[in-house]
Image (tube, helix red, strand yellow):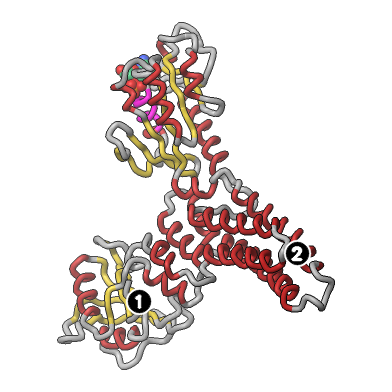
Amino acid sequence: MINGGTIYALATASGRAGVAVIRISGDQAGPALRSMTGREQVPTARRAVFGRFLDPANGEELDQGLVLWFPGPDSFTGEDVAELHGHGGPAVIGATLEALGRIPGCRLAGPGEFTRRAFQNGKMDLTQAEGLADLIAAETEAQRRQAQRQMNGALGGLYEGWRGDLIGSLAYLEADIDFPDEDLPGELLARQKPKLQSLAAAITAHLDDGHRGERLRDGCHMVILGAPNVGKSSLLNALAHRNAAIVSSQAGTTRDVIEVHLNLGGYPVVLVDTAGLRDSDDLIEAEGVRRALARGEGADLKIVLYDCAETPILDEQVLLLAGHDGIIVATKVDLADQAPRTGTAISTKTGLGLDGLLSRLEAEACRLMAGQSGPSLTRLRHRQGLENCRDALLRALDEVEGELVAEDVRLAARFLGGITGRVDVEDILDVVFGDFCIGK
Ligand code: GDP
């Protein structure tokens, strides 16, 4: 990514809309604003003024709308920022962007470049930048709340607090090394170890969260399993239509898996129908079961169906598929002579039991994703940084040599700093900001 220069981009979604916002950031934002509006001066800071947008090349009017001026460092990026709020039509936007491109020193922004500048100018840490990306991507209430919390600095604050503790310990450990005669040798070391121990325990507890935050960010996978013709597709369709908030419906990664994205009580759920089993031999056969188990392996929740009209007694394979925490559902209860003895009874034909099953799934979604007291880690990147940090701390606790302890503590602090971006992390920036779209 090219780093310097004044950047501009459409900040709102492209397509037709009432208003489109074009954002410009960098030291040429003021001159660009002046030449795009024909004004002698930039407007008063943070006050919207109405004006015409002109092509600087020939003075032709391209559009008209509101103009805003945010002088650095009190702007989103920390640099001078200008905003043009024009009409949201493709040709109008295209012409305005093209005109901006002809202004010396201005270029189209790359993905995430505005937020990257905000990070580089100390406006936010990396976890906050990720929180912002998640907020823009959030599709459900619970996702929005988690992203907002992270964007507001809850996660970064927790990690920075821990890093501060480590740096405090490090200062003492180094004093012990540098001035061994000042105090009883090793006493400072002995005093720091319990602190390191409790920090390692706090990190372990934070890591041991059942992947709640990551699951909430990505959507929790509930997989429907069962023998051919027990009513798996019918259930997927029934749940998808019963629940008004379908986020999207798409074919899965393999052709024979169908995924529907649902919003269950504010929690994002990916409901997966393993239609592939349809083509395999009878489920009773070992291969059928093996394939089903493999499908269900990555699932956060297994929903195992059996046809209670055909198999009044639950067979062993269903129990095997469900494991200890799967949900067993007895289907086609409208055709059954008697009430099934095991599982939640439903009929997609009459609708019986579907609301109850939906509530049960909502409760499971909440159990799997609801946050605990503190902020949750939301990405593998955080998890890896924390694991590395904890491992370094555990090594430090095993050491007896002051210098070696200090070295591992320094390393542990660096791993935490890598999560928030408070250390030299140039190499991970492309990874973090590459996820953004242009204009963010
Ligand atoms: P899958 O192979 O497990 O996905 O099963 P399908 O959903 O395709 O259903 C197989 C057959 O059972 C279809 O003919 C459905 O119409 C029928 N079916 C599914 N659910 C019910 C139900 O609750 N009651 C009745 N009577 N038929 C059902």
Residue 30 pos. (x, y %): 34, 86
In the picture, residue 334 is in which quadrant? top left
Q: In the drawing, does residue 27 fall left or right of residue 398?
A: left
Tell me, yes or no, if residue 84 can be seen here.
no
| Residue identified by numbered label 1 | 3
| Residue identified by numbered label 2 | 192
**Which residue is outermost to the bottom?**
40
Q: CA distance from mark 2 to mark 1?
A: 42 Å
Mark 2 or 1, nearer chain start: 1
In reply to whether residue 388 is colored magenta, the answer given is no
- Nearest the eye: 200 or 370: 200
- Nearest the eye: 178 or 281: 178
- Nearest the eye: 315 or 353: 315
Q: Residues within 10 Å of mark 2 (few under 14, many from 20)?
A: some
**Which residue is outermost to the right?**
184
**Rendered-image quadrant of the C terminus:** bottom left
Residue 274 pos. (x, y %): 36, 29
Residue 101 pos. (x, y %): 23, 78
Q: Secondary structure at mark 2?
A: helix
- Nearest the eye: 391 or 321: 391
Residue 370 pos. (x, y %): 57, 45
- Amino acid on which disc 1 is placed: Asn
Please state the extent of the stretch shown in magenta in the rendering: 232-239
In the picture, residue 193 is in which quadrant? bottom right
